[in-house]
Image (tube, grey):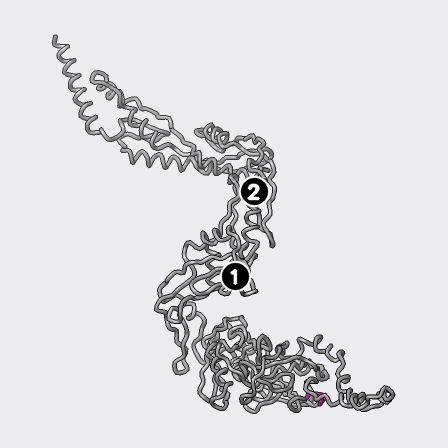
């Protein structure tokens, strides 16, 4: 009886100790539980997961060599997606010392002091990672199948056929990884590829190519607010992205490229108050931020362009239904602008380095003539233009054609060596003023032409004329800074100034005058000194006629203006018997001027079109108003001048059509 009491008492004490210990360690792992040599006893869930992460790190370093056919691919278990399953380890660790009842629990607890529980390490192989390894690491080493696809050429979209190949099953790789885990590395196993043909048909891809060719075969007119531009077929093709996948070929308009193209084409929209810009205050350029900036275009641009490309061209309604001129059918799309804060464009202007006056030139003229109106209209269009580094400015490109609709008036100009009125006459004065400002700014002349008659208000031999579309004045910015053109005028003068960062020192080192037939050739030499000490010398020139209406041979420059006096003798010989004397009659000799300028003399004009010796005489009159007359034709203008040593003298190259808006 006493023994039973003692045994019961001992069991009660043991049960009490087990209960107290279990209560204290309710949220931790039981005693003497191990995994891979690590004692998990007393650990919490978080601590066990940290152990799993450490074991995963060690596992990931095990190297693996995968053999696929004759290819050997080196990797490691971490890259292949193998890891320790932390959740499973937590579950097995906590259940290792549980499951006992009131009778067995105290004894199992007592037994745990002497006997450890060694857990198996649970592993996981991530299926997505295995799939990525197959497609990204193994497939490129195989001659896998290729689906047919759509590709862009220089002129159209075409289909490329697919081909069969071999592939590896990701499930096979996952099985090999599972079998390797737990064994000490390095690991080696092989995979067996199997053949596969593309599921995508060439016909389905061909339909996409046909749709794209139809969508990009015709131009597209894009409108934003009151501006419009035409995107050509090559430009439209450049905006297309084709996504070729196993599921098929799909296309879309690239939003980023579309915005870049359209913002370059449209620039800033809205009125002047909505554009960051330069102004000049007391000869100092200043940047004025906009109140707000209107830009092309919003985030729906790509979607709207794609939808427009799938439409058919339409003809806009004509204002006059009886107008025989039919408007061209074209596709159109209206895009929406975005409103940005007024600082847009300020940083870009600051980066141009336009900080100081680098050159200025002024020419004078009488007040209050039609030509003054033309000069000032032209100056208004030119003011504020910026020539970016390396870019070329064309005066005709900026101002466009001078027409009555734009407010231009008729004033004197030179045509074929003679004076006549033209719309926009007189604007060669601002061309000459711009020419001289560019001369002293050190810019390069890409295209220019001097007057063929000398006017004392211009520097002799250092001047330029202009007409539309040619001759033109084109200057190139050969500096690393932007160049701002700023025009100002009074009733009796026009000034063109150029602002930038002073980069080149310019000096007019003098002029030479020599005869070219009966004309005078005046050459001006310019010396430019650059920051590195390099000195460059170039020349500009003009060839002046001996008088109005005469060429450099002293002959009339316009045969059409010679009075038809040679026709009279023909009317004084009515009898048929007097016909023989016609061979000795004066008319035959007086017709000589027409034959002294044979067509062969025009050949040098064509072959020397790029030579400064070409005398195209597109010169403006710059005279007081003359009686109204229609505009004349235009000609090829002089290119940039070459040194005199390169000049081959040519005879007068008449007849050459010419015009100039003096």
Front-lying residue, 555 or 521? 555
Judge whether residue 253 can be spotted in this image. Answer: yes
Q: What percent of the width, then of the height, locates residue 191?
A: 54, 31
Front-lying residue, 289 or 621? 621
How would you rate the neighbour count of disc 2 (Cα within 10 Å): few for under 14, some for 14-19, many for 20 or more?
Answer: many
Q: Quadrant of the N terminus?
A: top left
Front-lying residue, 25 or 248? 248
Q: Which residues are magenta?
A: 550-554
Q: What percent of the width, then of the height, locates residue 604?
A: 72, 78
In the picture, the disc for residue 230 is 1
Q: Quadrant of the C terminus?
A: bottom right
- Residue located 31% across and 33% down the image: 48
Q: How many marks?
A: 2
Judge whether residue 478 can be spotted in this image. Answer: no
Which mark sits nearer the N-terminus, 2 or 1?
Answer: 2
Disc 2 to disc 1, C-alpha distance: 29 Å
User: Does the magenta run of residues contain 552?
Assistant: yes
How would you rate the neighbour count of disc 1 (Cα within 10 Å): few for under 14, some for 14-19, many for 20 or more?
Answer: some
Callout in the foreground (2, 1): 1
47 vs 630, left or right, is: left
Front-lying residue, 263 or 9? 263
Residue 342 in the image: above or below residue 511: above
Residue 277 in the image: above or below residue 321: below
The residue that mark 2 highlights is 205
536 vs 94, left or right, is: right
User: Does the magenta run of residues contain 213?
Assistant: no
In the picture, the disc for residue 102 is none
Q: Secondary structure at mark 1?
A: strand
């Amino acid at each position: 009886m006493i023994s039973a009491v003692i045994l019961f008492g001992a069991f009660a004490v043991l049960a009490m100790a087990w209960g107290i210990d279990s209560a204290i360690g309710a949220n931790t792992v039981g005693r003497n539980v191990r995994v891979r040599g690590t004692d998990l006893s007393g650990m919490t869930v978080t601590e066990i997961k940290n152990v799993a992460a450490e074991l995963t790190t060690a596992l990931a370093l095990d190297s693996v060599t995968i053999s696929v056919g004759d290819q050997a691919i080196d990797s490691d278990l971490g890259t292949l997606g193998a890891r320790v399953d932390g959740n499973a380890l937590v579950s097995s660790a906590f259940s290792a010392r549980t499951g006992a009842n009131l009778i067995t629990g105290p004894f199992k607890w007592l037994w745990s002091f002497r006997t450890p529980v060694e857990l198996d390490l649970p592993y996981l192989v991530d299926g997505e990672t295995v799939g990525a390894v197959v497609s990204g690491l193994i497939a490129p080493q195989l001659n896998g199948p290729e689906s047919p696809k759509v590709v862009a050429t220089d002129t159209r979209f075409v289909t490329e056929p697919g081909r069969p190949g071999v592939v590896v099953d990701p499930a096979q790789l996952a099985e090999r990884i599972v079998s390797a885990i737990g064994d000490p590395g390095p690991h080696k196993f092989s995979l067996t590829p199997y053949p596969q043909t593309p599921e995508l048909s060439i016909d389905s891809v061909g339909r996409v190519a046909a749709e794209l060719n139809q969508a990009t075969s015709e131009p597209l007119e894009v409108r934003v607010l009151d501006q419009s531009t035409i995107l050509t077929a090559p430009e439209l093709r450049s905006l297309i992205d084709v996504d070729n996948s196993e599921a098929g070929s799909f296309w879309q308009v690239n939003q980023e490229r579309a915005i870049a193209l359209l913002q370059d084409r449209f620039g800033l929209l809205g009125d002047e108050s909505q554009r960051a810009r330069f102004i000049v205050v007391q000869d100092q350029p200043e940047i004025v931020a906009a109140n707000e900036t209107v830009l092309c275009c919003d985030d729906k641009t790509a979607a709207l362009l794609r939808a427009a490309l799938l439409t058919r061209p339409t003809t806009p309604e004509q204002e006059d239904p009886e107008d025989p001129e039919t408007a061209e059918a074209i596709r159109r799309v209206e895009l929406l602008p975005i409103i940005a804060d007024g600082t847009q464009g300020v940083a870009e202007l600051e980066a141009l380095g336009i900080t100081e006056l680098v050159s200025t030139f002024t020419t004078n003229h009488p007040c209050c003539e039609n030509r003054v109106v033309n000069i000032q209209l032209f100056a208004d269009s030119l003011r504020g233009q910026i020539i970016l580094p390396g870019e070329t400015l064309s005066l005709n490109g900026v101002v466009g054609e001078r027409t009555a609709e734009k407010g231009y008036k008729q004033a004197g100009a030179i045509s074929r060596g003679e004076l006549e009125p033209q719309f926009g006459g007189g604007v060669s004065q601002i061309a000459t003023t711009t020419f001289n400002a560019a001369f002293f700014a050190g810019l390069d002349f890409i295209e220019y032409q001097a007057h063929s008659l000398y006017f004392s208000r211009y520097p002799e031999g250092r001047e330029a004329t202009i007409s539309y579309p040619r001759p033109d004045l084109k200057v190139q910015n050969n500096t690393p800074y932007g160049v701002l053109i700023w025009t100002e005028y009074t009733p009796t003068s026009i000034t063109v100034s150029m602002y930038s960062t002073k980069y080149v020192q310019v000096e007019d080192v003098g002029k030479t005058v020599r005869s070219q037939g009966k004309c005078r050739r005046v050459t001006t030499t310019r010396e430019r000194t650059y920051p590195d000490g390099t000195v460059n010398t170039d020349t500009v020139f003009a060839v002046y006629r001996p008088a109005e209406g005469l060429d450099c041979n002293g002959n009339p420059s316009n045969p059409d203006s010679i009075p038809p006096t040679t026709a009279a003798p023909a009317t004084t010989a009515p009898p048929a018997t007097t016909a023989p004397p016609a061979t000795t009659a004066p008319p035959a000799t007086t017709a000589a001027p027409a034959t002294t300028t044979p067509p062969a003399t025009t050949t040098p004009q064509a072959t020397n079109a790029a030579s400064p010796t070409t005398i195209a005489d597109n010169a403006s009159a710059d005279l007081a108003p003359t009686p109204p007359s229609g505009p004349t034709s235009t000609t090829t203008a002089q290119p940039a001048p070459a040194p005199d040593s390169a000049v081959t003298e040519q005879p007068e190259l008449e007849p050459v059509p010419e015009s100039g808006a003096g």
